[in-house]
């Protein structure tokens, strides 16, 4: 099963994140990666490499999620399992986050 989200920084496409075959993969898109004027989306995902792969959701994206009661309410309302962090990220980080980065 594969899920994918487009990562935006200030409404500009910076890359994509997906979950496939048990791995989370974040990849900067070519234009964003090759533009030296564009900063990394996070200190934990520097532009020293174009693609990152992890068995767990990258901490930067995990920290975009609500916590506690808010997360429970969102999951109940959206009918998403509370342990489906990637599904919750895709469902909420386009409109429910604060900051320059969003995932749609």
Image (spheres, rainbow, N blue to C red):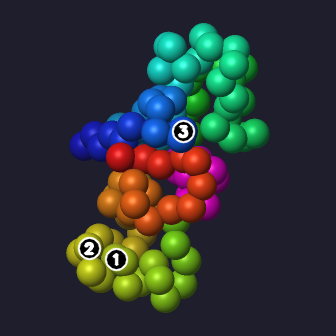
Secondary structure found at label 2:
helix
Q: Residues within 10 Å of mark 1 (few under 14, many from 20)?
A: many
Horizontal and vertical percent position of residue 36: 69, 14
Determine which of the numbered discs, if any, sits on residue 75 in the image. 1
Q: Is residue 10 above or below residue 50?
A: below
Q: Residue at x 33, y 40 (%)?
A: 4
Q: Which residue is mark 3?
A: 9
Q: Viewed as shown, does residue 60 lie left or right of 19?
A: right
CA distance separating discs 1 and 3 = 25 Å
Horizontal and vertical percent position of residue 97: 51, 62
Q: Which residue is mark 2?
A: 78
User: Dominant secondary structure of the magenta stretch?
Assistant: loop
Q: Residues within 10 Å of mark 2 (few under 14, many from 20)?
A: few
Q: Quadrant of residue 75?
A: bottom left
> Who is closer to the viewer here, 59 or 36?
36
Q: Is residue 92 above or below residue 94?
A: below
Q: Viewed as shown, does residue 104 lie left or right of 69?
A: left
Magenta-colored span:
55-64
CA distance separating discs 2 and 1 = 5 Å
CA distance separating discs 3 and 2 = 25 Å
Secondary structure found at label 3:
strand
Any part of residue 25 in sight = no
Q: Considering the image in quadrants, where does the N terminus appear?
A: top left
Q: Earlier in the sequence, mark 1 or mark 3?
A: 3
Name the residue furthest right. Answer: 43
Tell me if label 2 and label 1 are in contact, CB under 8 Å.
yes
Horizontal and vertical percent position of residue 37: 69, 19
Q: Residues within 10 Å of mark 3 (few under 14, many from 20)?
A: some
Which is closer to the viewer, label 3 or label 2? 3
> Who is closer to the viewer here, 79 or 70?
70
């Amino acid at each position: 099963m594969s899920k994918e989200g487009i990562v935006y920084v200030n409404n500009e496409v910076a890359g994509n994140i997906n979950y496939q075959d048990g791995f989370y993969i974040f990849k900067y898109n070519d234009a964003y990666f090759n533009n030296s004027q564009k900063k990394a989306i996070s200190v934990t995902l520097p532009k020293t490499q174009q693609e990152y792969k992890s068995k767990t959701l990258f901490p930067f994206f995990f920290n975009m999620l609500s916590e506690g009661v808010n997360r429970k309410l969102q999951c109940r309302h959206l009918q998403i399992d509370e342990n489906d962090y990637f599904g919750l990220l895709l469902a909420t980080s386009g409109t429910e986050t604060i900051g320059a980065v969003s995932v749609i």
